Amino acid sequence: MLNNPRVLALISKVCFFIYRHAAALVVLSPGFKRLLLERGVPEKKIHLIYNWCDEAALTISSYSDNDIVTKMQGYFNIVFAGTMGKAQALEVVLQAAVIVAEQNKKIRFVFVGGGIEVERLKDLANQLCLQNVLFLPRMPMSKIGQVLDLADVLLVHLRKDPLFAITIPSKTQAYMAVGKPLLMAVEGDAANLVVNSGAGLIAEPENAESIA
């Protein structure tokens, strides 16, 4: 998020100091490994360990919210669960919802969570007169498991940015653990994971027509 050359130069020096003196470096995606190799870090120092998911925390057997069930039943639910901030660029998903609404009124986008963009997204949904969008508040893992279980498709979306092409959002593993199809609107490593696993479909990020 920084663009001050002096600050960035200082951060780079700190990073390279750590790279040089660390016994081992753990990265969460192949892209980060490639980046460190390009920066001259010895390959023997770098260990790729993917994010994991606490499957037990997603169990729905211990909790049942009838209100959530009522709100989600009768629709084909495309669920986004997590932080709604600038990086997620979810206004594009609302634009996709406009396109989808013209084709099928029973397909709905469900946004679950909090973040600095929630109120703006709600306002935009109202401005677009969207009837196929539902916002649910941030909730504990004991509840979110039920929402994911009621989903038909689980959505991941990040801004179209080179940094995110080497990022695998942590919600990806939780989504895969639930066993529902993914719609991955993130380029690079995250898209490759979905393609190679056969876990869903990919869409171009920040492209409403592609998502629709």
Image (cartoon, rainbow, N blue to C red):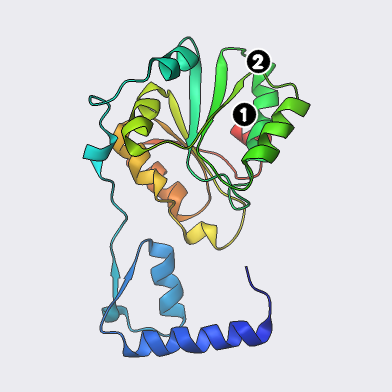
Quarter holding the C terminus is top right
What residue sits 62% from the left and 84% below the top?
7
What residue sits 38% from the left and 48% below the top?
193
Residue under label 2:
103
Quarter holding the N terminus is bottom right
Q: Position of residue 108 (x, y in %)?
A: 56, 21
208 sits left or right of 188 in the view? right
Residue under label 1:
212
- Given residues 163 and 203, the one toward you in this image is 163
Furthest residue to the top? 74
Q: How crowded is mark 1: few (under 14 residues within 10 Å), some or many (20 or more)?
A: some
Q: What is the secondary structure assignment of the residue under circle 2?
A: loop
Q: What residue type is labelled 2?
A: Gln
- Given residues 64 and 101, the one toward you in this image is 64
Residue 161, quarter of the rendered image: bottom right
- Given residues 84 and 41, the one toward you in this image is 84
What residue sits 56% from the left and 26% below the top?
109
- Image position of 54 with respect to 50: above or below: above
Residue 142, quarter of the rendered image: top left
What residue sits 62% from the left and 48% below the top?
116
Q: Are marks 1 and 2 in contact (CB under 8 Å)?
A: yes
Q: Where is residue 105 in the image (x, y as percent from the top left)?
A: 62, 12
Q: Where is residue 183 in the image (x, y as percent from the top left)?
A: 48, 35
The disc, 1 or 2, on the residue closer to the chain's N-terminal end is: 2
